[in-house]
Image (cartoon, coloured by chain):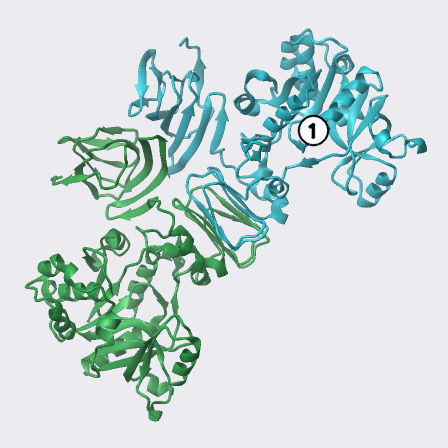
Chain colours: A green, B cyan
Amino acid sequence: MQLIFLSGGSGKRLWPLSNNARSKQFLPLLETADGKMESMVQRVVRQAREAKLQAQITFATNAAQRDSIINQLGSDVDIVAEPERRDTFPAIALAVSYLHFVKQCSDNEVVVVMPSDPYTEIGYFQTIAKMAHAVENNAADLVLMGIKPTYPSEKYGYVVPVRNDSLAFSVERLEEALPVSRFTEKPTTEVAKELLREGAFWNGGVFAFQLGYMMHIVRQYMQASGFDETYARYGEFPKISFDYEVAEKAKSVAVVPYSGKWKDLGTWNTLTEELGKHAIGNVLMGDENENTHVINEQEVPVFVNGLRDVVVAASPDGILVCAKDKSETIKKYVDGLTLRPMYEERRWGTYKVLSDVEYQPGERALTKTITLQAGKNISYQIHHRRDEVWTIIDGEGEFVLDGERRKIQRGDVCIIRREQYHAIRAITNLTFVEVQLGNPLIEEDIERFDYTW
Amino acid sequence: MQLIFLSGGSGKRLWPLSNNARSKQFLPLLETADGKMESMVQRVVRQAREAKLQAQITFATNAAQRDSIINQLGSDVDIVAEPERRDTFPAIALAVSYLHFVKQCSDNEVVVVMPSDPYTEIGYFQTIAKMAHAVENNAADLVLMGIKPTYPSEKYGYVVPVRNDSLAFSVERLEEALPVSRFTEKPTTEVAKELLREGAFWNGGVFAFQLGYMMHIVRQYMQASGFDETYARYGEFPKISFDYEVAEKAKSVAVVPYSGKWKDLGTWNTLTEELGKHAIGNVLMGDENENTHVINEQEVPVFVNGLRDVVVAASPDGILVCAKDKSETIKKYVDGLTLRPMYEERRWGTYKVLSDVEYQPGERALTKTITLQAGKNISYQIHHRRDEVWTIIDGEGEFVLDGERRKIQRGDVCIIRREQYHAIRAITNLTFVEVQLGNPLIEEDIERFDYTW
């Protein structure tokens, strides 16, 4: 069985902890049973393994999230990053092509596609096992998970099973795959109420099918001879969702119901409901707060008192103070902020922007703390428009400047002028302060070269 | 006429903007008529000048505030900094000794002592002129300002004038200096109500007297031959307030009433009432806030929505989110924080701590941005227990290392190992990033030497 996790999104709703480089599913805010902190992707992967799904995992994602996935999940998962952002159908088409061409999975292997950020429990993964079983038994071309609705929501898509009084809900029937008659997207409350009476489910975005079924659809758009060609011609796939392109067009669809915990922790309001602690990070809580959560990723302390139903979140990107019931409004406001991410996870480690100031028109200075994980390196590169000064503050490594390599450690200084080739490798975990000077300072001012360590 | 402003206090109540190095009276949060921002000390000095008091100004303060006063008020005011913190009587005794010994003021010159942080209007300074006039006319040995009470407060000291029905309040009588019968400190509300019926005033902490009168009292504690001796023997003065030591013991005291605006902007609740703007700094205000103030001294944005009667304040020291009516509680909580100030005004400019982290036991790194004003320099010095790396990011200056002087500018790097003598002088305004490496990193690890630029 192949499990494809979809991981996308720019994550402005959980600003300032999420940003263009760190979507909500990578925030390490959830508490495990043994008190450790984990992110949503770490949670779903852990749950999938605990449910003994015996699945190989592939992440269908974008380039910006690749490093976060490697950082948080290690090398146990495959990653297929789309070369440009399109929609869920192309992303799944690319991942399925990877399974077909690169992993050489057989056409009758069961593939389950699911989001990487649902907040659920073990029953969710048991339902996935049932879906896979239904596909194996040819119950339908496409089997999807139906979430038992708790209220007539206008937000979700609905899956309506074939009307059949003999299918009236009972615990036994809920275990089965039910034939689907139609889909309805985001109905009015009135229509939603009617749908609930018909026994409709929310569409949870979990789909199971045989690899060959999806490859057949992929080939209708692209007759590629291999994965590299599929990747190169990715722009030819239409910008359309999997729901529209596959689910709604499928001739034979079944739904397997799930009625356990299922939440989208996509706003501060919903996320804080699932946080084990009211305060995470350097926080001083006064005695007069009520239902207030504080998450602080800055070094300096946050003091909060006299608040009710408020979320406070601070990160190197900014500071949020918002009534929980207004947390839906955040995206609207912060979309206007065009700031660079001040904190990023990369495959070699992390960096944090400490200061980013234009002193004079054309004299910009950016100060970062960079931590390189032991054994990792930053590629051999040059910049055309900026100088960099690195002061090593912890650990040991090797530094290369214009081909000359030397050992470096705490207290050493690396001065890199524009057009100088340079690279750095961590022997132990290595932390340094970087000051960039240039005009303008752009991320793209970088050319990478090969270097053999 | 000599005006002595008392400037002290550690300023935890307005945390995180105020700290041990920056008391509330130095926060540049008040708006002038022409839209500029000024601090409380800038405001009172401007008001004193606008009221044409014709007074020379001396600040009685402590060493930690000296640089802030010079920075904010320039060299137009004299500064007498006590060598150790005692109380208001010793502080005023030292300042008066300075007027006597150093400025050689005559014994009959009028001295007015006042706080440096009252939020008042022009009438306050006109009242001071009347007090000075009363002292000149020998109305009493000591003349103080009586604030017309607006409610029976338990917080203030009261000044009770001689009971005399002919002194019953009228606008005319309020203009006069009234003889004082007694003082009462912080009464119960019941007693305060009775005091109000007696025509008592709040003691506003403004005192006028002839220099000779106070020098006579000073000499009862110390027969010094000059200011230097007074300064050196400062510890011999008793730790007692001016109210107890002078006002309550004085044989002849008069009070001049003042009934205009008089506020102590000592908590966020009272301060925000006088802020012209709801947002100061990089702030994104949502549309659903009510009576909420945000002051942001960090570079990154603060977004606030859905709040009511809340103050949000962010600085390099930390972040505060507090219901305004709980702002009295702040001091209690943040007194427990033993963090170093992350932002300081010095006589040569300012610095801001960007990061302060202990990577390993004994491997501490402190990163700062330092701005030196054109023409100013940091003293020639060595450190015994830390290295420093400076990356110049704006401006031009001169750097001295072990006696060798060189020009420096944007992009240059100064590496200073422990035991190396070094100094820096700004030609234009000069900004650099400093990384300190040491164990432990203590402010006192510094020895200063003479250097002729």
- Name the residue furthest right: B165
Q: Is mark 1 on a helix, strand or loop?
A: helix
In the picture shown, does residue A121 fall above or below B124? below
Q: Which chain carries label 1?
A: B
Question: Residue B152: x, y in percent?
Answer: 79, 43
In the picture shown, does residue B292 fall above or below B316? below
- Mark 1 surroundings within 10 Å by alpha-carbon count, few (fewer than 14), some (14 through 19), many (20 or more): some
Return the residue at label 1: B122
Question: Residue A338: x, y in percent?
Answer: 35, 46
In this picture, residue B318 sits left or right of residue B330:
left
Residue B182 in sight in this render:
no
Identify the amino acid type marked 1: Ile
In the picture shown, does residue B168 fall above or below A51? above
Question: Residue B82: x, y in percent?
Answer: 62, 20
Q: Nearer the viewer, residue A132 or B289?
A: B289
* Residue A2 location, quadrant: bottom left
Question: Residue A83: x, y in percent?
Answer: 18, 55
Q: Quadrant of the C terminus of chain A?
A: top left
Image point (25%, 64%), residue name: A5
- Name the residue furthest front: B34
Q: Which of B32 and A383 is in front in this view?
A: B32
Image point (49%, 36%), residue name: B339
* Residue B180 location, quadrant: top right
Q: In which quarter of the image is the N terminus of chain A?
A: bottom left
Image point (82%, 41%), residue name: B192
